[in-house]
Image (cartoon, rainbow, N blue to C red):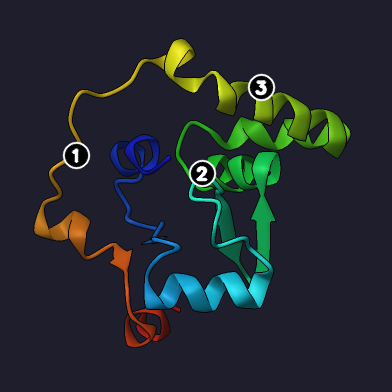
Amino acid sequence: MVAFVIPRDAAGRFRFVAIQSEAGAMLARRFGIRPDDPEAVAVVSGGMAYFKADAAIAIGRGLPGWRWVILLKAIPRPVRDFLYDCIARNRYRLFGKRESCLMPTPEIRSRFIATLPDLASAA
């Protein structure tokens, strides 16, 4: 998800938190995110946590050219989440897999939150 968002978020609106970090563990407890599921994607915005298809919609709404994803809200949540799970399970087959990880620039690195003070300053 990070590799999708970063090149499309020139304004730097999105911040990222690894579930294994101090800040990630705190957010997991607060919003009921399973810390043992590294594949989980959650979007925290306005004091609310969004998961699965709702998280993808929240991300799309914040990216230029992707705001149309709000139309997906017309699909009932169980159906949206089922489709999200199908795409997530088959993402490498559908979109390919990178041979190497993104080497973050200092600007990109600044968008990752690891500690509670970082989390407080990002709010």
Residue under the point 19% across and 60% down? 109
- How many residues crowd mark 3 within 10 Å: few (<14), some (14–19), many (20+)? few
Question: How many neighbours does mark 1 have within 10 angstroms: few (below 14), some (14-19), or many (20 or more)?
Answer: few
Instruction: Judge whether 68 appears above or below 120 on screen.
Output: above
Q: CA distance from mark 1 to mark 2?
A: 18 Å
Find out whether the residues at labels 2 and 3 contact each other: C-beta distance under 8 Å.
Answer: no
Question: Which three-letter amino acid code belongs to the residue tagged 1?
Answer: Leu
How many marks overall? Answer: 3
| Location of residue 71 by image quarter | top right
Give SS at disc 3.
helix
User: What amino acid type should be assigned to the residue bearing mark 3?
Assistant: Cys
- One can see residue 52 in this view: yes
Determine the residue positioned at 30% across, 63% down: 112
Q: Of 71 and 25, which appears nearest the observer?
A: 25
Decide: is 31 above or below 69.
below
Q: Where, quadrant-wise, is the C terminus in this rendering? A: bottom left
Residue 108 at x, y percent in the picture = 20, 55
Q: Residue at x 54, y 62 (%)?
A: 35
Dot placed on the residue nearer the N-terminal end, 1 or 2: 2
Classify residue 39 as left or right of residue 17: right
The answer to whether 12 is drawn above or below residue 121 in the figure is: above
**Percent position (x, y) of residue 74?**
85, 32
Element type at mark 2: loop
Query: Disc 2 designates what residue?
Result: 39
Q: Is residue 91 left or right of residue 34?
A: left
Residue of label 1: 102
Q: CA distance from mark 1 to mark 3?
A: 25 Å
**In this figure, which residue is indicated by the disc labeled 3?**
86
Q: Nearer the viewer, residue 7 or 88?
A: 88
